[in-house]
Amino acid sequence: DARVTQTPRHKVTEMGQEVTMRCQPILGHNTVFWYRQTMMQGLELLAYFRNRAPLDDSGMPKDRFSAEMPDATLATLKIQPSEPRDSAVYFCASAEGAVGYGYTFGSGTRLTVV
Amino acid sequence: KQEVTQIPAALSVPEGENLVLNCSFTDSAIYNLQWFRQDPGKGLTSLLLIQSSQREQTSGRLNASLDKSSGRSTLYIAASQPGDSATYLCAVDDTNAGKSTFGDGTTLTVKP
C-alpha cells in the first residue's frame, strides 16, 4: 500500500533552533504539498511543488521558512530560527498530475517549540 | 477566492443512526472534491474523491454526492458505528493544479 512517509514524527526543540522536516512522496506522484495544522487556523497550505519546482509558497513566512525538493523522492521543510508560534502539526501530501486525482497525506510531524 | 464551509462543526449521534455531513463551497467551477477522515493525533485518510463530472461516489457504508450548481456536497454514513468517530474534512480543488481548499471539518461522535 503506497504511502507518504514523514520524519520525524515528533520534534521538540528550543526557540531559535533550526528544524528540518522530511517527506518522501509516493513514487510517481509529481505534486507535493506542505500543510500546517493548528487548532486555531485549521489546515493551511504552506507550499507546493510540481515536478520538483516550487509553484506556490505564498502561505509560508519567507523570513524563516524554506521548502525544497532536492530530488523526486525527498521534500524538505526547514524553519530557521524556530519560534513557539511555529508549534503545530506539519503534513506533507502528494498527488498525481495537474488535475488532482486526490491527495495522499503523510502522518505528520508534530513540532513543539519551547 | 474559494471558501469551504462545513456545518455542523460537531455532531453526536447514537450508534446505528444514519447521518449526513455537509460541505458547501462558494465557487462552483471545481475540478474535484475529496472527503477525508482524521482521527485525533493522526493524519488525514482519504475516503472518497468525486471528479467534477461525477455526481456521487460510494465506498462501503459511505456515499458522497456532489451538486456543483448549488455548491454543495454531502457525505452520507449509513448505520454509524463508534469506530466512525473522527473529524471529517472536505477539500475542494478549483485550481486544476491539484491544490485544494479545505473546510474546517465536522467532528463526529458516535455513542455506543
Image (cartoon, rainbow, N blue to C red):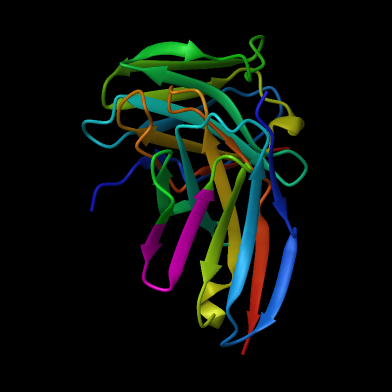
Query: Magenta stretch: residue B58 in it?
Result: yes
Q: Nearer the viewer, residue A57 or A24?
A: A57
Q: Residue at x 43, y 22 (%)?
A: B97
Q: Quick check: A39 above or below B86?
A: above
Q: Residue furthest front?
A: B69
Q: Position of residue A101 (x, y in %)?
A: 34, 37
- Left or right: A104 in relation to A112: left
Q: Position of residue B98 (x, y in %)?
A: 43, 28
Image quadrant for the C terminus of chain B? bottom right
Query: Magenta stretch: residue A24 in it?
Result: no
Snapshot quadrant of residue A11: top right
Q: Position of residue A31 (x, y in %)?
A: 36, 25
Q: Quick check: A110 above or below B74?
A: above
Number of numbered markers:
0
* Residue A112 visible at all: no
Q: Residue at x 63, y 20 (%)?
A: A59
* Residue B75 visible at all: yes
Q: Nearer the viewer, residue A40 or B65?
A: B65
| Residue range (magenta) | B57-66
Q: Position of residue A68 (x, y in %)?
A: 42, 15
Q: Residue at x 37, y 71 (%)?
A: B60
Is the magenta region chiefly helix, strand or loop?
A: strand
